[in-house]
Image: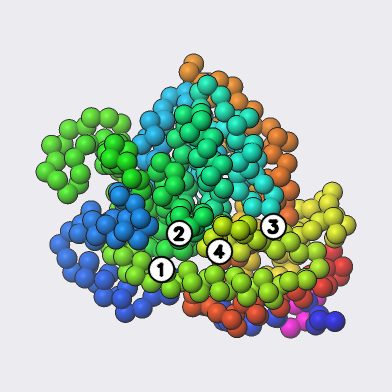
Amino acid sequence: MSEKPAILGGPKAVPDGSIRNWPPVDETDRRMVMASLEGSNHAFGPNCIAFQDEFAAWNGNRHALTTNSGTAALHMALVACDCGTGDEVITTAYSWSSSATCIMQHNCIPVFVDIDFDTMNIAPDRIEAAISDRTRAIIVVHLHGLPVDMDKVMDIARRRGLKVIEDCCQAHGARFKGRKVGTIGHCAAFSFNQNKCLSAGEGGMFVTDNDEMVEKANSLRSFGETRKPSENRDYHVYAMGWMYRNSDLAAAFGRAQLTKLDHYLAIQKENARRMSDCLAGTPALILPTAPEGFEHNWYNYTIRFDMAALGCADEPRSFRDKLVRAMQAEGVQTGVWQSFILPEMTVFQARNGYGKGCPWSCPHARPVDYSPELFPESQRHCDSHTGMTTPLRCPNGAREVELTASGIRKVMENADQIS
Ligand SMILES: *Cc1c(COP(=O)(O)O)cnc(C)c1O
């Protein structure tokens, strides 16, 4: 029998200060960021150009454009795929909000597809039923770092004449059948936000192998101009554009972190393997897995509670919240990643777009159904999960993982006392 849970007055499994912060910052970061600061171009400067080249080489893409966020890169991807007014774009019902709201940026309509409970990713076998004569593209999200089955998605896209955008914001370095994510679809978006596997504070990257797509994305990035920020500009606006460029300081930080990314990812994978070993056999816990040929990067190690085994399948949310609070009391850095499935969010339920019902009321649009009941697997996952990032990230290692696992195990072994 394990010790008394901390939430009931027992000792904490993870002593304060045990888990170190992400990302680690060392001399390389200091040197490169200071060099940028002492340079003369703090806007789209030499570090931005070098970051693009180095990231393209690291991931294996012909083109890369650095942006101020992953969300901006997603918006650029939609425009690169010629998505516009009235077009429908398919995405997963469970992700970060901007995997869906990016679709509305160019007046397109999001169409949601339920997930596979086991992988937490869009269910490829449910995609075809969501395709209409308006569908132009599919956004796949490699959620928490597990690749989507890209063979199935690319097969559908080829047969139905659709573009495929990979949302790789959580999936740096993940591979599907040996191929890096971001090289399989038509174009892709990465994020360099603080909490991502490559952190530059904020930032993002649009990648593609297609010459026309990179031009369209580049124009949107910089005011709708067609010249690159590094070229002589003619200050003429050819199409609608935003200002999505990255800054030199953030790019310098990103470049420094990129030199260490493979090392960080190797540690993260080792930590995830150890976490699964430590948690194996814990009562009422469903551990994350990766099918054969799917190489997870373990951005987020997400566990699910077996609510039927815990006897609360009818009221999963409140019990999930109690278990998570008990784990947090142990010092386990875990949380509820998303409390709502995407279609359930007010922006979609109330059709809160540009006002006056746009883009859904546009005469070019077709009605779509956002009833939450249509996405039962997403809901079941959403209500029964908790996930963690920092305890599995470098510089944390075996000791931090073992402490974290012991806190999770203690709570689950005493679950009957926590209700
Ligand atoms: C973080 C994230 C984004 C957005 O990235 P930002 O850089 O924060 O704009 C998009 N999609 C997914 C799946 C993400 O996790």
Mark 3 C-beta to ligand 1 under 8 Å: no
Residue 22: x %, y % from top left: 47, 71
- Residue drawn where x is 38% and y is 30% of the image: 82
Against 94, is 193 above or below?
below
Residue on which disc 2 sits: 172
Q: Residues within 10 Å of mark 2 (few under 14, many from 20)?
A: many
Q: Is residue 7 magenta?
A: yes
The residue tagged 4 is 298
Helix, strand or loop for disc 4 = loop
| Quarter containing the N terminus | bottom right
**Which label lies toward us, 4 or 3?**
4
For the point 32% across and 79% down, which residue is it?
27
Q: Which of disc 4 and disc 2 is earlier in sequence? A: 2
> What x and y, as percent, mark residue 244?
32, 46
Residue 366 can be seen in this image? yes
Rate crowding at label 3 as few (under 14), some (14 to 19) or many (20 or more) other CA atoms within 10 Å: many
Which numbered circle lies on residue 385? Answer: 3
Mark 3 to mark 1: distance in Å? 28 Å
Q: Which residues are magenta?
A: 6-11
- Return the mark for residue 261: 1
Please tell me how many numbered marks the rendered image carries: 4
20 up-or-down from 102: above or below: below
